[in-house]
Image (cartoon, rainbow, N blue to C red):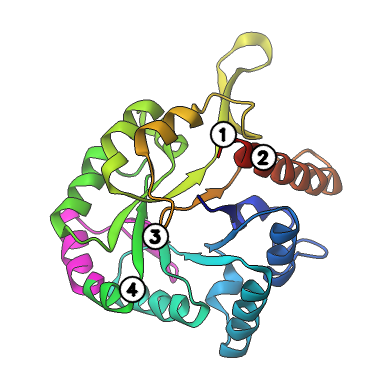
Amino acid sequence: MAIGVSTYAYQHRGDPSAPEPVPLLAMLHEIADLGGQVFQVCDHPDLEALTPEGAAELRAAAAERGLVLETGTRGTRPGHLRKHLALARSLGAVTVRSMAFAVVDGVDDRPTHPEVVERLRTVVPEYEAAGVTLGLETYEQLTTAELLAIVEAVDSPHLGIVLDPANCLANLEHPRDVVRRLAHRVVNIHVKDFAFTRREGWAGFTLASCPLGEGQLDYRDLLDVVRPDPARVHQVLEHWLVPQGDPAATRATEADWTARSLRTLASYQ
């Protein structure tokens, strides 16, 4: 099964406000050098601003390095999803990740569940015609039951779920339960480990990301339950790195986490 890395593993190094932000092309080459096979450009400003020339350059570099490109955005407005379908096609991507609720173009877009279904019924046939699959990511704004109901109401082989069980913890859902409820509709997997730790003084807890294999995500159980189709369901590494105080130390830690986690992910295959 193809494994790779999302731009969410470059939140600090790729931040446009950083002193020397890592551009998408450099991320692509680094992922290839680390042994990754997939690069998911997810919620990244450079994707929204990509020119036809930039898309052609990124697509050619991915082909040269043997990487699969995937894209990601937020929201379900048909016009917005059509824009990202065009971006996916320009990059040769066949998977687009999105979220049901999002801030899009500065507007907090929170449609009702029937509105989400109607929007998707309008645009998903266009994805299907293009051979592109749209995946809605698990997130605490929707319970897994609500997200599954939306996907099953549309009921298209080109609409499914991007599974990230860590995102459901804020909605008080257990990761193993999330995996079991959604396994049959998974089209993409976000691999993000996490750990609960006691705060100093034992007053409460902190939930934060950590390198894969060092936290409480039972990833082997996830693979056993989902049994993803290796030809179409890719595993994409992410993490939320809490700033380390010093920006240089934060960037160095992020690079280390990405490299270590990708090695761990490869060992699970």
Q: Is residue 22 left or right of 164 when viewed as pictured?
A: right
Q: Position of residue 205 (x, y in %)?
A: 56, 19
Along the polypeptide, which appears first: circle 3 or circle 4?
3
User: Do labels 2 and 1 touch, CB within 8 Å?
Assistant: yes
Residue that label 4 marks: 131
Residue type, numbered disc 2: Ser
Who comes first in sequence, dot 3 or dot 1? 3
Label annotation for residue 261: 2
Q: Is residue 59 visible?
A: yes
Label 2 residue SS: helix
Element at label 1: strand
Mark in the foreground, 3 or 2: 2
Q: Which residue is mark 1?
A: 193
* Residue 72 belongs to magenta span: no
Q: State how far apart marks 4 and 1 are (Cα).
A: 31 Å
> Does the CB distance between marks 3 and 4 fall below 8 Å?
no
Q: Earlier in the sequence, mark 3 or mark 2?
A: 3
Q: Whole-Å distance between the Cαs marked 2 and 1?
A: 9 Å
Q: For the residues carrying marks 3 and 4, which lies nearer the camera in this image?
A: 4
